[in-house]
Amino acid sequence: MRRKVNQAINLSDYKDIWVIGEQREGKIHPVTTELIGEAKKLVEGTANQVMVVIAGHNIEAEVEKLLYYGVDKVYYINSPLLETFSTDGYSKAIAELILEKKPEIVLVGATSIGRDIGPRLAAKIGTGLVADCTKLEIDPSDGKLLQTRPAFGGNLMATIICPINRPQMATVRPGVMKKAVHEANAVGVVEKISPTLKDEDIVAKVVEMIPSGKKRINLTDAKIIVSGGRGIKGPEGFDLIKALADKLGGEVGSSRACVDCGWIDHMHQVGQTGTTVRPVVYIACGISGAIQHLAGMSDSDYIIAINTDPEAPIFKVCDYGIVGDLKEVIPAMMEEVDKLKA
Ligand code: FAD
């Protein structure tokens, strides 16, 4: 089943863009529609089609929903052995289909599942993988995929190509690409696939799923995020950040500095090694604006920065900048919000 890396292949045998669809407990993960949106952009002006491959069991109704995002075909790999995610089962089933159908490009979400399965798939099908891309384009001169990602700690952007192997594979983090628009009518078709999978193919078995017990937050879809940085001075500083977020109906974000100090859980971290967000309003409180933080929030519609240092780099990217102590500015903002609500 494995194809050797650098084994000569005919590039013209490969066509179409595939999105590796993701589902958790039978519900489609939002990264799937984000990748469909990007794939639709990439096929514009080419003969390629957008296809999704999704593995699971008895999720027909959920899979059908994907057709309303302008997908030409969904390959639905259905098996009781694929009901819960397993690296062995999913990578074997999907790799077999890729080797048979020969897509030109394969896009994977850089979620915990995507980060697991992406490299496995690439190794099984003998191609490369560019992880955590922030921009994808087609080179108009030769049709190759230009895969751009931060390099050297985010200090420069590298554009990487996959010249001799196919498919060209990239992972993209959730929240980076815009979701495909839900359309009134479905256009494509679902093709059901029965994989050649046996119980013994899955070495590591899921015995039980235990919820982490932590309250999950959804930074990716939040419309308002109030984020705290080292300027809050300690874990108790997040009480003020949370008070403003609650008043505005938003979520609490954080810079990595606060996460590294143990003041807040990593699930709140915004940035290159945290979550990429694009809310309507992002309020950065006591955050300097390091390039790695900006990488995760600079696409927000409106950025408001509160910082005591007028030279802080965050002021170069914000729409509204307030030079001042967050302990005075945040309560004043909350008072104004109360007045507006009264
Ligand atoms: P600081 O840079 O220390 O800034 C604190 C700011 O608070 C200062 O500007 C100060 O003027 C201001 N301030 C102080 N007191 C007050 C007050 N009372 N009121 C108002 N303002 C005040 N960082 C991330 O955030 N996300 C990432 O995903 C991330 N990934 C990284 C990946 C790599 C490979 C590397 C090398 C770094 C990464 N970083 C990331 C770290 C990043 O480089 C910065 O160190 C970090 O963002 C700094 O956090 P900060 O702005 O909270 O702290």
Image (cartoon, rainbow, N blue to C red):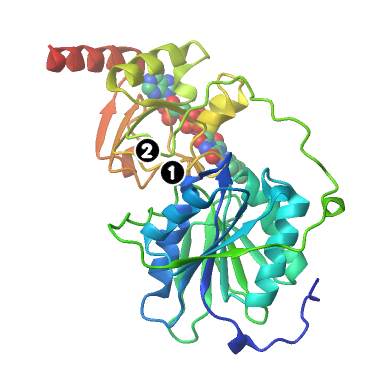
Is residue 130 visible to us here?
Answer: yes
Residue closer to the observer: 144 or 151: 144
Q: Which residue is mark 2?
A: 314
Q: Amino acid at mark 2?
A: Ile
- Is the residue at mark 2 in contact range of ligand 1, meaning its CB lies under 8 Å from it? yes
Q: Which picture quadrant has residue 311?
A: top left
Helix, strand or loop status at disc 2: helix
Distance in Å between CA atoms under marks 1 and 2:
8 Å
Q: Residue at x 53, y 21 (%)?
A: 215
Q: Check contact, mark 1 vs mark 2: CB within 8 A.
A: yes
Q: Element type at marker 1?
A: helix
Q: Is residue 166 visible?
A: no
x 83%, y 43%: residue: 204
Q: Nearer the viewer, residue 49 or 193?
A: 193
Q: Residues within 10 Å of mark 1 (few under 14, many from 20)?
A: some
Q: Is residue 218 above or below residue 181?
A: above
- Quarter holding the N terminus? bottom right
Return the x and y of residue 303 as percentages of the image width and height. Answer: 30, 37
- Up the image or down, 331 lies above or below 293; here it is above
Name the residue at 87% across, 52% down: 200
Q: Amino acid at mark 1?
A: Leu
Mark 1 or 2, which is nearer the eye? 1
Q: Position of residue 177 (x, y in %)?
A: 42, 54
Label 2 Cα neighbours within 10 Å, binned few <14 / some 14-19 / many ≥20: many
Residue closer to the observer: 210 or 176: 210
Q: In the figure, is residue 311 to the left or right of 170?
A: left
x and y, in percent, of residue 69 in the image:
38, 59
Mark 1 lies on residue: 294
Instruction: Please give left or right for residue 317 compared with residue 218 in the image.
Output: left
Q: Quadrant of residue 92?
A: bottom right
Q: Position of residue 34 (x, y in %)?
A: 44, 54
